[in-house]
Amino acid sequence: MGNLTPQAFSYVAELVRREAAIVLGPGKEYLVEARLTPLARAAGAADVSAYVSTLQSPARAKQRMAVVEALTTNETSWFRDGEPFEALRTTVVPQLLTQVPPSRRVNVWSAACSSGQEAYTIAMVMAEHAGGRKVDILASDLSQEMLDRTKAGSYSQLEVGRGLPAPMMVKHFRRSGTQWQVSEQLRSMVRTQRINLATPFPPLPVFDVVFLRNVLIYFDTPTKRAILQRVRQVLSPQGFLFLGGAETTIGIDDGWDRTTVGRFTLYRPASAADPTPVPVPSLAWAATAEGR
Amino acid sequence: MTTVRALVIDDSRTMRSLLSRQLVALGYEVLQAGHGEEALEVLERAGGEVPHLATVDWNMPVMDGLTFVQKVRSRPEWRSISLMMVTTEAEYDQIVRALAAGAHEYLIKPFTQEAFIDKLDLLGLVPAKALS
């Protein structure tokens, strides 16, 4: 596949802005190339630019919608991007167990949850490592269809095949016809709510952890800043923010401190009590869990 | 870096060559076997160069994949081999049986190349150069 031409990029950017109010600024060529390559191949086009040039005919409305969807739908896949969940398990959960009183639920937000894989992956980590604490996971999305899918917790063989370790699958899923059904234990931890991140949030609880991965990339800088500021208002001062690998708060909202866990970067509200969390050794963690 | 080695075990020549091609593209050195007993012979001859990965079909003549997994797991010198069942057996109980026998991952046929690479990634077996 060749490089995306500026004409093709600006056409796609304008299409997505018009249809989904999402801004694909300069530098997002890679995203367009990556997301549209499968569509271009399926259509037999030489490359993405050639495919885009066929979209402009009035008869291609359906293909244009497919392009918008390909660029605005997050492909989520369980533990496939392992680092965030590794950071959750080794660093965030042990800290939460010491800083959240046992009498209170741990609140987690999976923002722009798509079909729910991230929310249930968080639920799996919490079920296994949060020492029996009560955990509430809010899964939000703009699309009611995605929220319904999340709530149903039913996934095809193809979907569970993407990055869900087999031992986790047999532990937390059951076969239901051709689908795999998330266990009642995990489903009881997850509730859904329709939230548009680009507008003021509805009343929300104070969260200990917010997952906002691969969402900011779709917005322009002022909207990114507004979203990050609103997230700070609903995040506990000792809370943690997870962003996507290509996203950062730097140069957008300076109200955050960064801390790295392995190759992964976590964000906390600036001047959090302990801005440099260190992974708690497993022995200390076990002692904490038992000592409650 | 050291070469990653895989042993592809399947009685279907088509499936062996499909998996082998994908592994070679990732930088693997690949050996093949048509059933469990043949695979055990390959391992016996491998000496210190045991594969990092074995993909194991379930239903094969002579020795099936489940028996092969059990035999590999009973040998301490083969403990480092990651075992991935790659099979049409898709029932929950079958997956549980394979994992209990010692398989690390389980991929149901038919599968996409992306799903296969995801499983390798979960096992930490996607060579760094394939990712860059």
Image: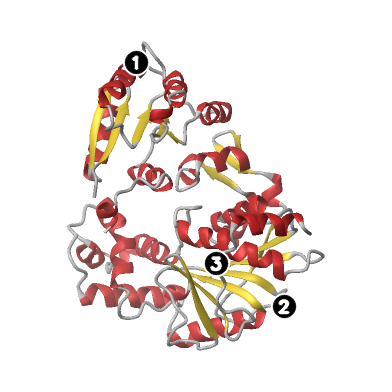
The chain under label 2 reads A
Pointer 2 residue = A203
Q: Is residue A162 rendered to the left or right of residue B127?
A: right
Considering depth in this image, is B9 or A13 the residue closer to the camera?
B9
* Quadrant that contains the C terminus of chain A: bottom right
Q: Where's residue A141, x and y in %? A: 58, 66
Tell me if label 1 and label 3 are in contact, CB under 8 Å: no
Indicate which disc, 3 or 2, sits on the residue closer to the N terminus.
3
Say which quarter of the image contains residue A136. Answer: bottom right
SS class, disc 3: loop
Pointer 3 residue = A112
Q: Is residue A123 rendered to the left or right of residue B55?
A: right
The answer for how far apart the CA atoms under marks 1 and 3 are is 50 Å
Q: Where's residue A258, x and y in %? A: 50, 78
* Residue placed furthest toward the top: B62
Residue A173 in view in this figure? no
| Above/below status of A228 relative to A167 | below
Considering depth in this image, is A215 or A260 the residue closer to the camera?
A260
